[in-house]
Amino acid sequence: MENVDFTPDEKIEAFDKLARRFYKCNFGQMSKADFELLMFNIILKKIVSENSSQDGIIDFNKCSDYQLSKILGITQQRVRNLKIKSQLAYPIEFDWQKALASLLENARFDQATKKIMLNIPDPNLFIEIQNYIEEKGAYIEVQLNKKILQIRAEYFIDLVVSLEEETKRNEIVKEIKKRLKEANKDETKFVDREIGKSLIEATVNITEIVANISSLISPGNVLGKSLVKFFS
């Protein structure tokens, strides 16, 4: 297999996975689709492990649909579908916040639409981000290109603040209200639990808001630190 070499221990582990599915009175019950999914998961975990930093951040660009399609000789769309199915059957743990933070440096901010746009190379990472944003009452705009994440900057700020502890969130909200008042905006209309929507309605300067709350973002909020760096 091109560019992929398994160690003896990895080969033993892979065989054990197959054996568990075929033996113990299960011989012949595994479908072709299930067999292919397991084989795909084995190589996916191999490539992910080789492209992860010591603190667990996966380099999703090196595990992209394109890279895997070249190795396996199948289409990128099929790789994408297999990734989603594989994650459901054989989950690979990853920190979506750290992954998104690492990708933010390549994002683009459209001053006219106030939207942040960036490429998300992995479908499971995209799903995790989308799910969290929607759970918080915000939304992303679906594109024809399924890899493009497009979200209003105000909702991104809301996302960052939601990752803080309640005490810190309250401090940030207080600071935002203070800045709105200084800018002659009606801070009384600001809804604490709807930061993104409130910022949109107030038509604020995004860069200034991020700069104003930057010192309040916790050191452990890697996504928040990346957002500050992005707008600085």
Image (cartoon, rainbow, N blue to C red):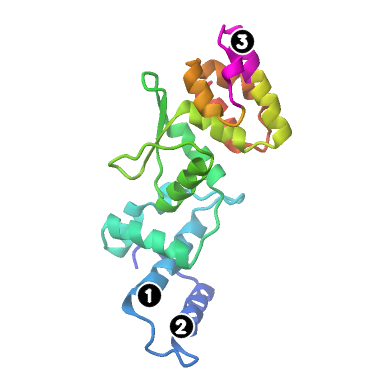
Q: In the current view of this chain or complex, which residue is farthest to the right?
A: 167
Three-letter residue code for mark 2: Arg
Percent of width and height locating residue 42: 45, 69
Of the 4 image quadrants, the one containing the N terminus is bottom left
Give the residue at mark 1: 34
Give the residue at mark 3: 181
Residue numbers of the magenta segment: 176-191
Majority SS type along the magenta span? helix
> Looking at the image, is mark 3 or mark 2 nearer the viewer?
3
Give the residue at mark 2: 21
- Nearest the eye: 64 or 203: 203
Percent of width and height locating residue 56: 58, 51
State the image quarter where residue 38 is shown: bottom left
Label 1 element class:
helix
- Nearest the eye: 126 or 131: 131
Per the model, the C-alpha gap separating discs 3 and 1 is: 59 Å
Left or right of residue 228: residue 27: left
Residue 17 vertical placement versus 73 (above, below): below
Q: Residue at x 57, y 22 (%)?
A: 210
